[in-house]
């Protein structure tokens, strides 16, 4: 199920070949489903900087597959290679049975792509944006009109088909982007950070819409995200990517089960002290302790109720006061910390120096 990370001190679950990875709720429920996307030892270099470092995974037909990781982890670079936007340095990606390097046109005709940025023309109406995009894919007029009607209904924008795009809210514009990506009836759908910048209500609405689209159109979806809840709610399987490497792969349940400790006790003391982490690690059922800000500790334990009792007794014995105490189940946040050694973070993407070549005829 998983591919081990780089930290030898962490206990790794047994590895399962990707082609045999168990699946749940993937649309057709068959363990032997056809592979829609196959990524084989793919590498992307910019000069000496290696953005993607030999990643392997498969995406099955009818499932939603998530690439989870922080900004700068290599998720968007992976999507750009799979959608033919940037060349692969080495390795290969097969999308819908076509090699992205040798059969790029065939790949483009069978995929829909939703970029991270909103790219619809704001001065055009909703319908005009969809019509232009359909024409770019040479969708015949009769089919074009039918598709526009269907996708507007699918994303609940029928009432706004004549509205200028610039008058739409952020959530509605995101739904327009999704409709535009569906206008030519793709089999495989790529979404790069589909809910970035949306408020919580709009984000949940997009999740519900994507699930409905997957079932109605039997779409295979691959999405990138750095929202843990989004990956947990949407994805049949998740690959965790960090620093260009695949560090874990499995269903959300499998990934959570791979982390030692079935419960998480979150505790905050009224006085911060460097001694607390050592004391917490000394409790019998504790498997890991994560120190957070403002004196908060996340304690992974195999027995939440017993650890909670021991925490209260320890604080009382030391005449310390507990500010807050709660017991939770293991989350994808804990999975990410387990495999990468730190919390999910936003980091600056490393830039690669680029020198514009001189124009023809100009003196250096």
Image (spheres, helix red, strand yellow):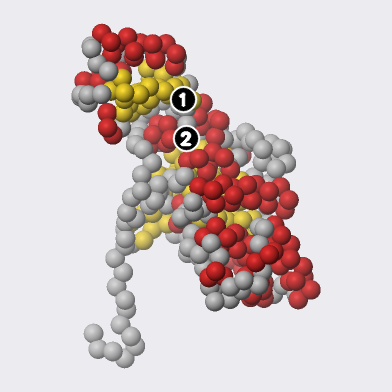
Instruction: Report the number of numbered marks.
Output: 2
Determine if residue 356 is in view. yes
Instruction: Say what secondary structure mark 2 lies in.
Output: helix
Residue in front for this viewpoint, 14 or 335? 335
User: 10 Å neighbourhood of mark 1: few (<14), some, or many (≥20)?
Assistant: few
Q: Position of residue 13 (x, y in %)?
A: 48, 27
Give the quadrant of residue 167.
bottom right
Instruction: Say what secondary structure mark 1 lies in.
Output: strand
- Residue in the image at 25% along x and 20% along y: 276
Position of 302 compared to 37: left or right?
left
Work out which quarter of the rendered image holds the C terminus and state it.
bottom left
Q: Position of residue 107 (x, y in %)?
A: 62, 63
Q: Position of residue 340 (x, y in %)?
A: 38, 37
Q: Is residue 337 above or below residue 288?
A: below
Position of 352 compared to 165: left or right?
left
- Residue in the image at 37% along x and 17% along y: 286
Residue 59, disc? none
In the picture of the structure, the residue carrying the numbered disc 1 is: 328
User: 10 Å neighbourhood of mark 2: few (<14), some, or many (≥20)?
Assistant: many
**Residue most extreme to the right:** 142
Residue in front for this viewpoint, 61 or 101? 61
Residue 332, disc? 2
Residue in front for this viewpoint, 229 or 76? 229
Give the quadrant of residue 93.
bottom right
Q: Where is residue 114 in the image (x, y as percent from the top left)?
A: 56, 60
């Amino acid at each position: 199920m998983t591919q081990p990370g780089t930290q030898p001190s962490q206990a790794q679950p047994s590895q399962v070949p990707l082609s045999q990875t168990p699946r749940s709720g993937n649309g057709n429920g068959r363990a032997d489903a056809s592979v829609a996307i196959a990524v084989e030892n793919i590498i992307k270099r910019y000069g000496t900087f290696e953005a993607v470092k030999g990643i392997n995974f498969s995406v099955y037909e009818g499932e939603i597959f998530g690439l989870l990781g922080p900004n700068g982890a290599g998720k968007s670079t992976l999507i750009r290679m799979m959608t033919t936007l940037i060349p692969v340095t080495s390795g290969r990606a097969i999308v819908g049975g076509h090699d992205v390097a040798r059969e790029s046109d065939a790949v483009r005709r069978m995929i829909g792509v939703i970029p991270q940025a909103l790219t619809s023309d704001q001065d055009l109406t909703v319908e005009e944006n969809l019509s232009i995009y359909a024409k770019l894919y040479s969708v015949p007029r009769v089919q074009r009109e039918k598709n526009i009607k269907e996708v507007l209904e699918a994303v609940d924008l029928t009432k706004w088909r004549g509205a200028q795009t610039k008058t739409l809210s952020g959530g509605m514009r995101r739904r327009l982007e999704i409709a535009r990506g569906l206008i030519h009836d793709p089999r495989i759908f790529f979404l790069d950070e589909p809910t970035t910048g949306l408020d919580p209500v709009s984000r949940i609405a997009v999740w519900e819409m994507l699930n409905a689209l997957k079932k109605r159109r039997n779409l295979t979806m691959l999405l990138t995200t750095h929202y843990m809840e989004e990956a947990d709610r949407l994805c049949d399987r998740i690959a965790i990517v960090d620093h260009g490497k695949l560090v874990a792969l499995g269903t959300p349940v499998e990934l959570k089960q791979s982390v030692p400790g079935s419960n998480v006790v979150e505790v905050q003391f009224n006085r911060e002290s460097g001694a607390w982490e050592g004391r917490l690690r000394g409790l019998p059922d504790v498997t890991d302790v994560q120190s957070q800000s403002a004196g908060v500790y996340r304690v992974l334990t195999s027995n939440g109720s017993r650890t909670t009792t021991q925490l209260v007794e320890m604080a009382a014995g030391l005449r310390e006061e507990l500010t807050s105490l709660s017991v939770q189940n293991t989350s994808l946040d804990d999975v990410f910390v387990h495999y990468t050694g730190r919390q999910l973070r936003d980091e600056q993407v490393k830039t690669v120096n680029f020198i514009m070549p001189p124009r023809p005829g100009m003196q250096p």
